Image (cartoon, helix red, strand yellow):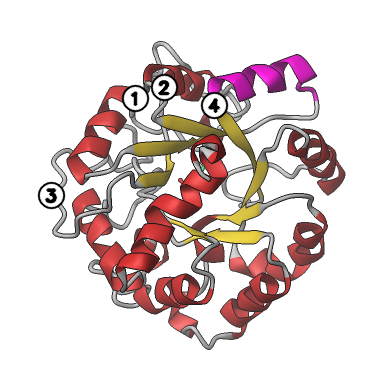
Amino acid sequence: MSEDYLPFCAAPSVPRFEPPAGSVDAHCHIFGPAATFPFAPERKYTPVDAPKETLFALRDHLGFARNVIVQATCHGRDNSAMVDAMQASGGRARGVAIVGAEVTDDELQALDDAGVRGVRFNFVKRLVGKTPKAVFQTIAERVVKLGWHIVVYFEAADLPELAPFLKSLPGIVVVDHMGRPDVAAGVEGAGFQAFLRLLDENPNIWVKVTCPERLTVTGPPYHDVIPFGRELVERYPTRVLWGTDWPHPNMRSHMPDDGELVDVIARIALSPSHQKALLVDNPMRLYWPEETG
Ligand code: 0GY
């Protein structure tokens, strides 16, 4: 076990909520195995190995059909573990990559061929060094030509500074983990209200209703986070995605039971139509558009 990382839940419960057929876990990671896919030298944390076989077994155990594997900072710009997992998935995994300005058009095309459909810009200071926005802007303009979208991860406190940049990005922009609101301030808090205004005014901005385990103050079963997820699902039913965030890097307070995380879905998406939009229709439109009408 790594010194700075709790291990993921080895035996998650069977969820009581049954995801609709074809559901997509639209935010999860692959880590290593480090012996085959070493972690990036510049990483800020060292996770335990979380290989593709374990992810695919979890997918089946939880009742999901597909995964979107998001490149995490501990693998830096080396997307090979994610690419290997997508190639082993039989078409049931797509990916979101991290690339730098040095990436060539041929490399972008190879990532696209492997199933990458988005690029991730990370602004969370504990995870990454600073990248000039002009670099991200140039990358965005290049990947949008491939039909990719942009995934952004930031802390709510940084939204005022980031908002003009987010509005300037081309194509679809997906915000990780509900924009990481301060849940103690409540849904009516100024930070979350500013985030809602951003989504109200920019119909190209989507949001992942993920990570109650990261956002909670009160702990499982995450009563304090539910109103945030529910507000987003009900207000933007066609622009929300859900994911486990397995294997939950950097969790120190507690490690969630992934079956219990799936049960959260029924508390934030109350109707079958909202559940199907969240788990099937929206991620399919973004990651498997060739299969949607
Ligand atoms: C997540 C969240 C975290 C880590 C990363 O790229 C990453 O390393 O995103 C975090 O520590 O909050 O999405 O897994």
Which mark is in front, 2 or 4?
4
Mark 2 or mark 1, which has the lower sequence index? Answer: 1
- Pinpoint residue 143: horizontal percent, then vertical percent: 74, 34
**In this rendering, position of residue 207 left or right of residue 217:** right
Q: Mark 3 falls on what kind of element?
A: loop
Q: Disc 1 vs disc 3: Cβ atoms closer than 8 Å?
A: no
Establish if 175 lies above or below 88: below
* Nearer to us in this view, 117 or 210: 117
Query: Looking at the rendering, which quadrant does residue 3 occupy?
Result: top left
Q: Disc 3 vs disc 4: Cβ atoms closer than 8 Å?
A: no
Mark 4 or mark 1, which has the lower sequence index? Answer: 1
Specify whether residue 113 is painted magenta: yes
Q: Disc 2 vs disc 1: Cβ atoms closer than 8 Å?
A: yes
**Amino acid of disc 1:** Lys
Main secondary structure along the magenta-highlighted residues: helix
Q: Is residue 71 visible?
A: no
Residue at label 3? 13
**Label disc, if present, on residue 52 of the rendered structure:** 1
**Label disc, if present, on residue 85 of the rendered structure:** 2
**Label disc, if present, on residue 115 of the rendered structure:** 4
Cα distance between the residues tagged 2 and 1: 5 Å
Q: Mark 1 falls on what kind of element?
A: helix
| Magenta-tinted stretch | 102-115
Mark 3 or mark 2, which has the lower sequence index? Answer: 3
**Amino acid of disc 2:** Ala
Mark 4 Cβ and ligand 1 under 8 Å apart: no
Residue at point 26% right, 53% down? 19
Task: Specify the quadrant that holds the N terminus.
Answer: top left
Residue at point 36% right, 66% down? 273
